[in-house]
Amino acid sequence: MEPQTQARAPQSSDRPDRQSEADWLQAAYELLTEAGVDAVKIMPLAKRLGVSRTSFYWHFKDRDALLEAMVNRWEQKNTGNLIARTEAYAESIAEAVFNLFDCWIDDDLFDAPLDLAIRNWARNDADLGQRVDQADARRKQAMADMFVRFGFDQTQAEVRALTMLYTQVGYISMQIEEDREGRINRMPDYIEVYTGQRPTSREWQRFRARHL
């Protein structure tokens, strides 16, 4: 068995002049979404950033700490923003779902490649799998609560929430590519399918103006 070695503590001469913790996280994100979690290793990251391996330890205790930071980024951005959009002010269920649909259009709100990478990683990591299940439960509950606020009974709210959740996970997993305007123009029809109500022209135009 190969002997375990401890990483040398970074010295003052190792302090990176240019690369920040955010730079390491971005490089890790790129490797994770391009090639999966097994590709996220310190030496390839250092080469990608053009710095020494030891400079990594100014920002993270070890590789596990970096991976934990990536999972936290996913939880905060994707699940956090999704829940926030379900709670945004709306005067109708159609407007509320349009608020949620902002996540599917705005990459600053929801990162689809990261969602896919995390789910793929979780297939071989039981602990992460539990966190994905917890995140999905939070997303489902937030969407169901949104429907309940607009008069849907609990059963209908949960079924509609699950339909939206499963559809979006499938959309991401299939890595569907479609032009932005075409996808946006289909949103009123999705609203009608998910809610049983056609959005008003005013609701549709407000949503469209946010994204086109």
Image (cartoon, rainbow, N blue to C red):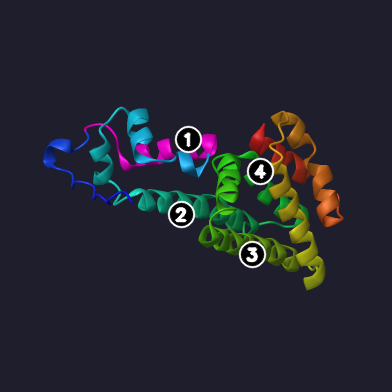
Relative placement, left or right, of 45 versus 162 is left
Q: Which mark is residue 104?
A: 4
Give the farthest residue toward the front. Answer: 1
The amino acid marked with disc number 1 is Glu
Give the farthest residue toward the left. Answer: 12
Q: Position of residue 166 (x, y in %)?
A: 74, 53
In which image quadrant can residue 52 be found?
Answer: top left
C-alpha separation, residue under disc 2 versus residue under disc 3:
17 Å
Asked whether the viewer can see residue 201, the reply is no
Asked whether the viewer can see residue 68, the reply is yes
C-alpha separation, residue under disc 4 versus residue under disc 1:
20 Å
C-alpha separation, residue under disc 2 versus residue under disc 1:
16 Å
Mark nearer the N terminus (4 vs 1)? 1
Mark nearer the N terminus (2 vs 3)? 2
Crowd around label 3: few <14 · some 14–19 · many ≥20 (10 Å): some
Q: Position of residue 210 (x, y in %)?
A: 64, 38
In which image quadrant can residue 96 be found?
Answer: bottom right
The residue at which mark 2 appears reads as: 72
Crowd around label 1: few <14 · some 14–19 · many ≥20 (10 Å): some
The residue at which mark 1 appears reads as: 30
Q: Which residue is drawn at 43% across and 39% down?
A: 28
Foreground mark, 3 or 1? Answer: 1
Q: Where is residue 11 in the image (x, y as percent from the top left)?
A: 14, 42
Task: State the predominant SS element of the stretch in magenta.
Answer: helix
Q: Give the range drawn in magenta.
A: 17-35
C-alpha separation, residue under disc 3 versus residue under disc 1:
27 Å
The residue at which mark 3 appears reads as: 137
Q: Any magenta on residue 200?
A: no
Mark nearer the N terminus (4 vs 2)? 2
Mark nearer the N terminus (2 vs 1)? 1
